[in-house]
Amino acid sequence: MTARATALVALLGGSFDPVHNGHVALAALFDSLLHPTELRVLPAGNPWQKTNGLKASAEQRVDMIRIAFAEAGLPVTIDRQEIERTSATYTIETLGKVRAELGPEVPLVFLMGADQLQHLDTWRDWRELFALTHFGVAARPGYSLTALPDAVQAEITPRLATADQLRDSAAGRVLLAPELAVDISATQIRAALARDGDAKAPVPGGVLDYIQQHNLYK
């Protein structure tokens, strides 16, 4: 087997406004389960589902991502394609570009929390995503797929697989990891920081320092 055939790329997307402990915990969980050869972090540019805009600039969000994952000891590559796009960004377009870069055989795993899975059927061309990527979904212990919309549940259930099965194919499977009890809202973090620069905000220490130094979320 060639080195390229053993590759696996994990991709974590999000606004990261700011990056917080939940993002890092999710990435660390799948790093331990999948042992990816590359962990990419994909900060959003202009997400079509968010109408209230991003508070930190693209470069500030990139800086905070670097700080957070370096502090956690998780090597990451920052994929800038969405923040460099001037139009609205859609996951289907982004993953299409990543797949074209990787080629048809390299396993690609898009990481998300169960809360995102709950709304998967609102994403553009959502069923077509499975032709491009696997999904790694982090959920609380005891999480049940019956909580999902019927269409998503019907699509996900036959695709459930183990980490080894994800490594054996390029796309189309779902690894459900009910091992992560993290409930953190970036909106709530920004509100806490706006009130009093809350030192108890669930963000990595270096990120909190950066936020305070740059007077963000005031």
Image: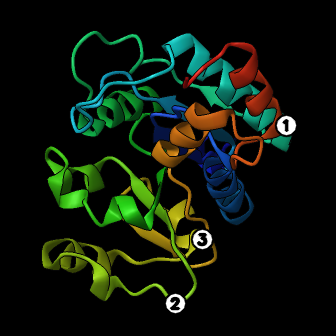
- Using the image, determine if residue 56 lies above or below residue 30: above
Residue topped by disc 3: 164
Quarter of the C terminus within the rendering: top right
- Secondary structure category for the residue under label 3: helix
Task: Give the residue at the far front of this rendering.
Answer: 195
Question: Which element type, helix, strand or loop, lies under badge 2?
Answer: loop
Crowd class of label 3 (few under 14; some 14 to 19; many from 20; radius 10 Å): few
Q: CA distance from mark 3 to mark 1?
A: 29 Å
Give the alpha-carbon distance from disc 2 to disc 1, as whole Å.
30 Å
Q: Quadrant of residue 152?
A: bottom left
Question: Would residue 95 be found to the left or right of residue 60 on screen?
Answer: left
Question: Which comes before the other along the chain, label 2 or label 1?
Answer: 1
Q: What residue type is disc 2 on? A: Gly
Q: Residue at x 36, y 58 (%)?
A: 116
Determine contact: label 3, label 1, CB under 8 Å. no
**Residue 114 in the image, given as x and y percentages of width and height:** 42, 67
User: Could you classify mark 1 by the number of other residues whose Cα lies within 10 Å: few (under 14), some (14-19), or many (20 or more)?
Assistant: some
Question: What residue is at 32 percent from the left and 46 percent from the top?
Answer: 132
Sequence-wise, which precedes: disc 3 or disc 2?
2
Q: Position of residue 83 (x, y in %)?
A: 42, 16
Q: Who comes first in sequence, dot 3 or dot 1?
A: 1
Left or right side of 107 for 8: right
Q: Amino acid at mark 3?
A: Asp
- Mark 2, Cα crowd under 10 Å, few <14 / some 14-19 / many 20+, is few
User: Measuring 51% from the left and 40% from the top, which residue is drawn there?
Assistant: 191
Residue beneath disc 1: 71
Which residue is the site of mark 2? Answer: 142
Q: Nearer the viewer, mark 3 or mark 2?
A: 2
Q: Amino acid at mark 1?
A: Glu
Q: Estimate the x, y position of residue 115 in percent, counting from the top left.
A: 39, 64
**CA gap, disc 3 to disc 2?**
22 Å
